[in-house]
Image (cartoon, rainbow, N blue to C red):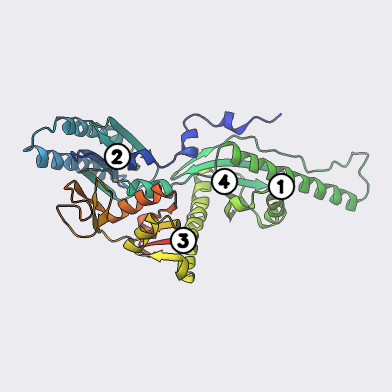
Amino acid sequence: MKTPVASILSPELRPWTTLKFPVTLANVYDENAKAISFYFSQASFSERSHKEELLNAKHLVNQVKTKCSSEGGNEDLFRDLAMIREVEQQIRATPARFKAVFACDKKQIWQEYDLPICENVSCLEVATHFKLVPLLRALESCTPYCVAIVENGKAKSFLIHGNEIHDLDARLPAADLSVHADDSRVGWSHHIDSNVSERRKAYMRELAMDLQRLLTSIDCEHLVIGCREEVWSELEPELGKAGSAAMIAGRFHLASFDLTSAGILQAARPVFDEWQRERYVEFWLKVREQPAHSAVGVEPVLRSLESGRVHKVCLGNIPDTKLYICAGCNVWWNKAEEECPACGKADVYAIAAEELLLRKALLTDAEILAPGAAIAAALGPVGALLRY
Protein backbone atom coordinates (compact mmCIF):
# COMPACT_ATOMS: atom_id res chain seq x y z
CA MET A 1 0.00 0.00 0.00
CA LYS A 2 1.44 3.37 -1.05
CA THR A 3 1.57 6.37 1.29
CA PRO A 4 -0.13 9.54 -0.07
CA VAL A 5 2.44 12.16 -1.00
CA ALA A 6 0.49 14.91 0.79
CA SER A 7 0.98 13.11 4.10
CA ILE A 8 4.71 12.61 3.46
CA LEU A 9 5.39 16.24 2.54
CA SER A 10 6.58 18.01 5.69
CA PRO A 11 4.53 21.03 6.91
CA GLU A 12 7.30 23.52 6.19
CA LEU A 13 7.31 22.51 2.50
CA ARG A 14 3.56 22.58 1.85
CA PRO A 15 3.24 26.39 1.68
CA TRP A 16 5.70 26.61 -1.23
CA THR A 17 3.51 24.42 -3.44
CA THR A 18 0.46 26.68 -3.04
CA LEU A 19 1.99 30.13 -2.47
CA LYS A 20 -0.10 32.65 -4.42
CA PHE A 21 0.16 36.34 -5.08
CA PRO A 22 -1.51 38.37 -2.26
CA VAL A 23 -4.36 39.97 -4.22
CA THR A 24 -5.73 41.60 -1.04
CA LEU A 25 -2.61 43.78 -0.78
CA ALA A 26 -3.32 45.19 -4.25
CA ASN A 27 -6.64 46.58 -3.00
CA VAL A 28 -5.10 48.60 -0.15
CA TYR A 29 -5.32 52.39 -0.40
CA ASP A 30 -4.15 54.53 2.51
CA GLU A 31 -5.19 58.15 2.09
CA ASN A 32 -2.55 59.12 4.67
CA ALA A 33 0.21 57.59 2.48
CA LYS A 34 1.66 55.41 5.27
CA ALA A 35 1.68 52.05 3.45
CA ILE A 36 5.22 50.62 3.71
CA SER A 37 6.83 48.31 1.14
CA PHE A 38 10.23 46.94 2.17
CA TYR A 39 12.35 44.78 -0.12
CA PHE A 40 15.79 43.43 0.59
CA SER A 41 17.91 40.81 -1.12
CA GLN A 42 21.57 40.73 -2.06
CA ALA A 43 23.84 37.81 -2.84
CA SER A 44 26.50 37.99 -0.15
CA PHE A 45 28.77 35.43 1.39
CA SER A 46 31.72 37.33 2.87
CA GLU A 47 31.57 38.81 6.36
CA ARG A 48 32.20 42.27 4.98
CA SER A 49 29.38 42.14 2.44
CA HIS A 50 27.10 40.72 5.14
CA LYS A 51 27.74 43.76 7.34
CA GLU A 52 27.17 46.02 4.35
CA GLU A 53 23.76 44.45 3.87
CA LEU A 54 22.77 45.23 7.44
CA LEU A 55 24.01 48.80 7.18
CA ASN A 56 22.14 49.21 3.92
CA ALA A 57 18.86 47.97 5.46
CA LYS A 58 19.36 50.26 8.48
CA HIS A 59 20.12 53.19 6.16
CA LEU A 60 16.87 52.67 4.22
CA VAL A 61 14.82 52.84 7.42
CA ASN A 62 16.69 55.86 8.79
CA GLN A 63 16.19 57.75 5.52
CA VAL A 64 12.42 57.44 5.79
CA LYS A 65 12.40 58.33 9.51
CA THR A 66 14.46 61.46 8.85
CA LYS A 67 12.18 62.51 6.02
CA CYS A 68 9.04 62.07 8.12
CA SER A 69 10.34 63.25 11.51
CA SER A 70 9.32 66.87 10.85
CA GLU A 71 5.74 65.84 10.15
CA GLY A 72 3.20 65.17 12.88
CA GLY A 73 1.02 62.11 13.38
CA ASN A 74 3.63 59.56 12.35
CA GLU A 75 3.56 57.39 15.47
CA ASP A 76 1.96 54.48 13.60
CA LEU A 77 4.51 54.77 10.80
CA PHE A 78 7.44 54.79 13.23
CA ARG A 79 6.10 51.67 14.94
CA ASP A 80 6.04 49.86 11.61
CA LEU A 81 9.55 51.07 10.80
CA ALA A 82 10.81 49.85 14.18
CA MET A 83 9.39 46.40 13.40
CA ILE A 84 11.08 46.42 10.01
CA ARG A 85 14.38 47.12 11.76
CA GLU A 86 13.82 43.85 13.61
CA VAL A 87 13.73 42.07 10.25
CA GLU A 88 17.48 42.72 10.19
CA GLN A 89 17.81 39.76 12.55
CA GLN A 90 16.39 37.55 9.81
CA ILE A 91 18.74 39.12 7.27
CA ARG A 92 21.63 38.34 9.59
CA ALA A 93 20.54 34.69 9.81
CA THR A 94 19.83 34.19 6.09
CA PRO A 95 21.54 36.94 4.09
CA ALA A 96 21.21 35.44 0.62
CA ARG A 97 17.40 35.35 0.44
CA PHE A 98 14.66 37.59 -0.91
CA LYS A 99 12.69 39.38 1.82
CA ALA A 100 9.61 41.55 1.50
CA VAL A 101 7.50 43.21 4.18
CA PHE A 102 4.22 45.08 3.69
CA ALA A 103 2.99 47.11 6.64
CA CYS A 104 0.23 49.60 7.29
CA ASP A 105 -0.69 50.13 10.93
CA LYS A 106 -3.92 51.95 10.15
CA LYS A 107 -5.14 49.07 7.98
CA GLN A 108 -3.78 46.52 10.50
CA ILE A 109 -1.55 44.93 7.88
CA TRP A 110 1.78 43.23 8.46
CA GLN A 111 2.76 40.61 5.90
CA GLU A 112 6.22 39.10 5.38
CA TYR A 113 7.70 37.03 2.56
CA ASP A 114 10.97 35.14 2.75
CA LEU A 115 11.90 33.45 -0.53
CA PRO A 116 14.93 31.27 -1.38
CA ILE A 117 16.26 33.40 -4.23
CA CYS A 118 18.83 36.18 -4.55
CA GLU A 119 17.93 39.42 -6.30
CA ASN A 120 19.85 42.67 -6.26
CA VAL A 121 17.08 44.77 -4.71
CA SER A 122 17.03 47.20 -1.79
CA CYS A 123 13.93 49.32 -1.44
CA LEU A 124 11.84 51.00 1.26
CA GLU A 125 8.85 52.91 -0.06
CA VAL A 126 6.10 54.70 1.86
CA ALA A 127 3.07 55.61 -0.24
CA THR A 128 -0.69 55.40 -0.57
CA HIS A 129 -0.38 51.85 -1.87
CA PHE A 130 2.00 48.89 -1.69
CA LYS A 131 4.71 48.28 -4.27
CA LEU A 132 3.89 44.75 -5.42
CA VAL A 133 5.45 44.10 -8.84
CA PRO A 134 8.88 43.12 -7.40
CA LEU A 135 7.12 40.52 -5.24
CA LEU A 136 5.20 39.20 -8.24
CA ARG A 137 8.43 38.86 -10.24
CA ALA A 138 10.15 37.12 -7.31
CA LEU A 139 7.32 34.64 -6.85
CA GLU A 140 7.37 33.77 -10.55
CA SER A 141 11.15 33.38 -10.63
CA CYS A 142 11.00 30.77 -7.86
CA THR A 143 7.97 28.84 -9.07
CA PRO A 144 8.08 25.40 -7.36
CA TYR A 145 8.62 22.38 -9.59
CA CYS A 146 9.26 18.68 -9.15
CA VAL A 147 12.27 16.74 -10.36
CA ALA A 148 12.24 12.99 -10.92
CA ILE A 149 15.42 11.07 -11.62
CA VAL A 150 14.77 7.72 -13.25
CA GLU A 151 16.71 4.55 -13.96
CA ASN A 152 15.49 1.13 -15.02
CA GLY A 153 13.44 -0.13 -12.10
CA LYS A 154 13.94 2.84 -9.72
CA ALA A 155 13.18 6.54 -9.33
CA LYS A 156 13.51 9.40 -6.84
CA SER A 157 11.56 12.65 -6.60
CA PHE A 158 12.41 16.13 -5.30
CA LEU A 159 10.76 19.52 -4.88
CA ILE A 160 12.77 22.57 -5.99
CA HIS A 161 11.84 26.06 -4.88
CA GLY A 162 14.25 28.75 -5.98
CA ASN A 163 17.69 27.80 -4.68
CA GLU A 164 16.40 25.07 -2.36
CA ILE A 165 15.84 21.36 -3.05
CA HIS A 166 13.97 18.95 -0.81
CA ASP A 167 13.76 15.18 -1.03
CA LEU A 168 10.10 14.20 -1.42
CA ASP A 169 10.64 10.72 0.03
CA ALA A 170 7.52 9.81 -1.94
CA ARG A 171 8.39 6.14 -2.33
CA LEU A 172 8.09 6.09 -6.10
CA PRO A 173 7.74 2.47 -7.19
CA ALA A 174 10.75 0.23 -7.62
CA ALA A 175 10.82 -3.06 -9.44
CA ASP A 176 13.16 -6.03 -9.81
CA LEU A 177 13.61 -6.22 -13.58
CA SER A 178 16.00 -9.16 -13.53
CA VAL A 179 14.99 -12.73 -14.41
CA HIS A 180 16.74 -15.42 -12.39
CA ALA A 181 18.26 -18.43 -14.15
CA ASP A 182 16.75 -20.93 -11.70
CA ASP A 183 13.24 -19.76 -12.50
CA SER A 184 11.44 -22.82 -13.97
CA ARG A 185 9.54 -20.55 -16.35
CA VAL A 186 12.73 -19.32 -17.98
CA GLY A 187 13.68 -20.95 -21.25
CA TRP A 188 15.78 -19.63 -24.04
CA SER A 189 17.62 -16.31 -23.92
CA HIS A 190 15.16 -14.53 -26.19
CA HIS A 191 12.39 -15.45 -23.74
CA ILE A 192 14.45 -13.91 -20.94
CA ASP A 193 15.04 -10.74 -22.95
CA SER A 194 11.33 -10.49 -23.75
CA ASN A 195 10.39 -10.97 -20.11
CA VAL A 196 12.77 -8.25 -18.93
CA SER A 197 11.54 -5.88 -21.63
CA GLU A 198 7.90 -6.41 -20.61
CA ARG A 199 8.73 -5.82 -16.96
CA ARG A 200 10.57 -2.63 -17.85
CA LYS A 201 7.63 -1.33 -19.89
CA ALA A 202 5.21 -2.19 -17.10
CA TYR A 203 7.40 -0.33 -14.63
CA MET A 204 7.53 2.78 -16.82
CA ARG A 205 3.76 2.64 -17.23
CA GLU A 206 3.23 2.50 -13.47
CA LEU A 207 5.88 5.18 -12.85
CA ALA A 208 4.16 7.58 -15.27
CA MET A 209 0.91 7.21 -13.35
CA ASP A 210 2.70 7.69 -10.02
CA LEU A 211 4.34 10.88 -11.26
CA GLN A 212 0.92 12.19 -12.28
CA ARG A 213 -0.44 11.39 -8.82
CA LEU A 214 2.61 12.99 -7.20
CA LEU A 215 2.09 16.31 -8.98
CA THR A 216 -1.62 16.30 -8.18
CA SER A 217 -1.07 15.47 -4.51
CA ILE A 218 1.26 18.40 -3.85
CA ASP A 219 -0.49 20.83 -6.23
CA CYS A 220 2.61 21.22 -8.42
CA GLU A 221 2.23 21.91 -12.14
CA HIS A 222 5.72 21.32 -13.53
CA LEU A 223 8.08 18.37 -13.76
CA VAL A 224 11.72 18.06 -14.86
CA ILE A 225 13.00 14.56 -15.65
CA GLY A 226 16.59 13.39 -15.24
CA CYS A 227 17.47 10.14 -17.01
CA ARG A 228 19.53 8.51 -19.76
CA GLU A 229 18.39 8.68 -23.38
CA GLU A 230 17.33 5.03 -23.59
CA VAL A 231 15.28 5.36 -20.39
CA TRP A 232 13.58 8.48 -21.75
CA SER A 233 12.63 6.69 -24.98
CA GLU A 234 10.55 4.25 -22.90
CA LEU A 235 9.23 6.70 -20.31
CA GLU A 236 8.15 9.52 -22.62
CA PRO A 237 5.31 7.61 -24.39
CA GLU A 238 3.93 6.46 -21.03
CA LEU A 239 3.91 10.02 -19.69
CA GLY A 240 1.80 11.01 -22.68
CA LYS A 241 -0.69 8.22 -21.99
CA ALA A 242 -0.88 9.18 -18.30
CA GLY A 243 -1.67 12.80 -19.17
CA SER A 244 1.58 14.16 -17.72
CA ALA A 245 3.22 15.27 -20.98
CA ALA A 246 1.92 18.85 -20.66
CA MET A 247 3.57 19.13 -17.24
CA ILE A 248 7.07 18.25 -18.50
CA ALA A 249 9.19 21.40 -18.39
CA GLY A 250 12.28 19.64 -19.71
CA ARG A 251 14.84 16.90 -19.24
CA PHE A 252 18.51 16.57 -18.42
CA HIS A 253 20.98 13.72 -18.86
CA LEU A 254 21.46 11.77 -15.63
CA ALA A 255 25.09 10.72 -15.39
CA SER A 256 24.55 8.79 -12.16
CA PHE A 257 21.50 7.78 -10.14
CA ASP A 258 23.56 8.53 -7.02
CA LEU A 259 23.85 12.22 -7.92
CA THR A 260 23.66 14.42 -4.80
CA SER A 261 20.78 16.81 -4.15
CA ALA A 262 23.08 19.74 -4.91
CA GLY A 263 24.03 18.10 -8.21
CA ILE A 264 20.37 17.55 -9.11
CA LEU A 265 19.57 21.20 -8.37
CA GLN A 266 22.52 22.30 -10.50
CA ALA A 267 21.36 20.13 -13.40
CA ALA A 268 17.63 20.87 -13.18
CA ARG A 269 17.64 24.62 -12.56
CA PRO A 270 18.93 25.66 -16.02
CA VAL A 271 16.37 23.35 -17.64
CA PHE A 272 13.47 24.97 -15.79
CA ASP A 273 14.83 28.49 -16.31
CA GLU A 274 15.04 27.83 -20.06
CA TRP A 275 11.44 26.54 -20.05
CA GLN A 276 10.28 29.77 -18.39
CA ARG A 277 12.29 31.89 -20.83
CA GLU A 278 10.74 30.04 -23.78
CA ARG A 279 7.26 30.81 -22.40
CA TYR A 280 8.01 34.54 -22.55
CA VAL A 281 9.58 34.31 -26.01
CA GLU A 282 6.56 32.38 -27.30
CA PHE A 283 4.23 35.01 -25.84
CA TRP A 284 6.01 37.85 -27.64
CA LEU A 285 6.07 35.90 -30.91
CA LYS A 286 2.28 35.60 -30.71
CA VAL A 287 1.96 39.31 -29.93
CA ARG A 288 4.00 40.23 -33.01
CA GLU A 289 2.29 37.68 -35.27
CA GLN A 290 -1.22 38.80 -34.26
CA PRO A 291 -1.19 42.62 -34.18
CA ALA A 292 -4.98 42.76 -34.57
CA HIS A 293 -5.42 40.65 -31.44
CA SER A 294 -2.71 42.17 -29.26
CA ALA A 295 -1.64 45.42 -27.61
CA VAL A 296 1.84 46.76 -26.90
CA GLY A 297 2.86 49.66 -24.67
CA VAL A 298 1.63 50.99 -21.33
CA GLU A 299 -1.37 53.04 -22.42
CA PRO A 300 -2.70 50.67 -25.14
CA VAL A 301 -2.52 47.74 -22.72
CA LEU A 302 -4.21 49.74 -19.93
CA ARG A 303 -7.06 50.67 -22.25
CA SER A 304 -7.44 47.05 -23.34
CA LEU A 305 -7.49 45.94 -19.69
CA GLU A 306 -10.20 48.45 -18.84
CA SER A 307 -12.34 47.18 -21.71
CA GLY A 308 -11.96 43.61 -20.43
CA ARG A 309 -10.32 42.37 -23.62
CA VAL A 310 -6.99 41.12 -22.22
CA HIS A 311 -6.50 37.37 -21.94
CA LYS A 312 -2.80 37.41 -20.99
CA VAL A 313 -0.42 40.25 -20.17
CA CYS A 314 3.37 40.20 -19.83
CA LEU A 315 5.06 42.79 -17.61
CA GLY A 316 8.34 43.03 -19.46
CA ASN A 317 10.93 45.80 -19.42
CA ILE A 318 8.55 48.61 -18.42
CA PRO A 319 9.95 52.16 -18.30
CA ASP A 320 9.96 53.86 -14.89
CA THR A 321 6.89 55.92 -15.77
CA LYS A 322 4.54 57.59 -13.31
CA LEU A 323 0.82 57.74 -13.91
CA TYR A 324 -1.81 59.54 -11.87
CA ILE A 325 -5.05 58.13 -10.63
CA CYS A 326 -8.13 59.48 -8.87
CA ALA A 327 -8.99 57.62 -5.66
CA GLY A 328 -12.62 58.60 -6.12
CA CYS A 329 -13.45 57.54 -9.69
CA ASN A 330 -10.32 55.47 -10.58
CA VAL A 331 -9.67 57.43 -13.76
CA TRP A 332 -5.98 57.56 -14.70
CA TRP A 333 -3.91 59.95 -16.80
CA ASN A 334 -0.26 60.60 -17.59
CA LYS A 335 0.38 64.23 -16.54
CA ALA A 336 0.63 65.62 -13.02
CA GLU A 337 -2.52 67.54 -12.08
CA GLU A 338 -3.89 68.52 -8.68
CA GLU A 339 -7.46 67.64 -9.56
CA CYS A 340 -9.05 64.72 -11.40
CA PRO A 341 -9.90 65.79 -14.98
CA ALA A 342 -12.98 63.57 -14.85
CA CYS A 343 -14.67 64.30 -11.50
CA GLY A 344 -12.74 67.36 -10.27
CA LYS A 345 -11.80 65.84 -6.91
CA ALA A 346 -8.39 66.48 -5.39
CA ASP A 347 -7.79 62.97 -4.03
CA VAL A 348 -5.13 62.25 -6.64
CA TYR A 349 -2.03 60.11 -6.21
CA ALA A 350 0.91 58.98 -8.35
CA ILE A 351 1.52 55.33 -9.14
CA ALA A 352 4.18 53.51 -11.19
CA ALA A 353 2.89 52.35 -14.56
CA GLU A 354 3.73 48.70 -13.85
CA GLU A 355 1.83 48.82 -10.55
CA LEU A 356 -1.30 50.19 -12.22
CA LEU A 357 -1.01 47.56 -14.96
CA LEU A 358 -0.82 44.86 -12.30
CA ARG A 359 -3.93 46.13 -10.50
CA LYS A 360 -5.96 46.45 -13.70
CA ALA A 361 -4.94 42.93 -14.72
CA LEU A 362 -6.05 41.54 -11.34
CA LEU A 363 -9.41 43.33 -11.61
CA THR A 364 -10.13 41.76 -15.01
CA ASP A 365 -8.80 38.30 -14.11
CA ALA A 366 -6.19 38.42 -16.88
CA GLU A 367 -3.33 35.93 -16.76
CA ILE A 368 -0.13 37.74 -15.73
CA LEU A 369 3.42 36.88 -16.78
CA ALA A 370 6.08 38.66 -14.71
CA PRO A 371 9.61 37.66 -15.73
CA GLY A 372 12.56 38.54 -13.49
CA ALA A 373 14.56 41.67 -14.18
CA ALA A 374 17.33 39.91 -16.14
CA ILE A 375 14.89 38.24 -18.55
CA ALA A 376 12.58 41.26 -18.73
CA ALA A 377 15.46 43.42 -19.95
CA ALA A 378 15.59 41.36 -23.16
CA LEU A 379 11.83 41.51 -23.77
CA GLY A 380 9.46 44.22 -24.94
CA PRO A 381 8.01 46.73 -22.44
CA VAL A 382 4.49 45.42 -21.79
CA GLY A 383 2.30 43.41 -24.12
CA ALA A 384 -1.09 41.74 -24.09
CA LEU A 385 -2.90 39.04 -26.00
CA LEU A 386 -6.56 39.95 -26.43
CA ARG A 387 -9.65 37.78 -26.05
CA TYR A 388 -11.29 39.23 -29.17
In the displayed structure, 9 sits above or below 60; it is above
Q: Which residue is mark 1?
A: 152
Residue in the image at 29% along x and 39% along y = 28
Q: Earlier in the sequence, mark 2 or mark 3?
A: 2
Q: Which residue is mark 4?
A: 147
The N terminus - image quarter: top right
Name which residue type carries label 3: Leu
Q: Residues within 10 Å of mark 1 (few under 14, many from 20)?
A: many
Q: Are marks 1 and 2 in contact (CB under 8 Å)?
A: no
| Percent position of residue 145, x then y | 52, 45
Q: Residues within 10 Å of mark 4 (few under 14, many from 20)?
A: many
Disc 2 secondary structure class:
loop
Front residue of 15/191: it is 15
Disc 4 secondary structure class:
strand
Disc 3 secondary structure class:
strand
Q: Earlier in the sequence, mark 1 or mark 3?
A: 1
Front residue of 275/167: it is 275
Q: Which residue is mark 2?
A: 28
Closest to the camera, between mark 4 and mark 1, is 4
| Percent position of residue 128, x then y | 22, 43
Q: Residues within 10 Å of mark 3 (few under 14, many from 20)?
A: many
Residue in the image at 44% along x and 58% along y = 309
Real-space CA distance between mark 1 and mark 3, rounded to the nearest whole angstrom: 46 Å
Q: Which residue is mark 3?
A: 386
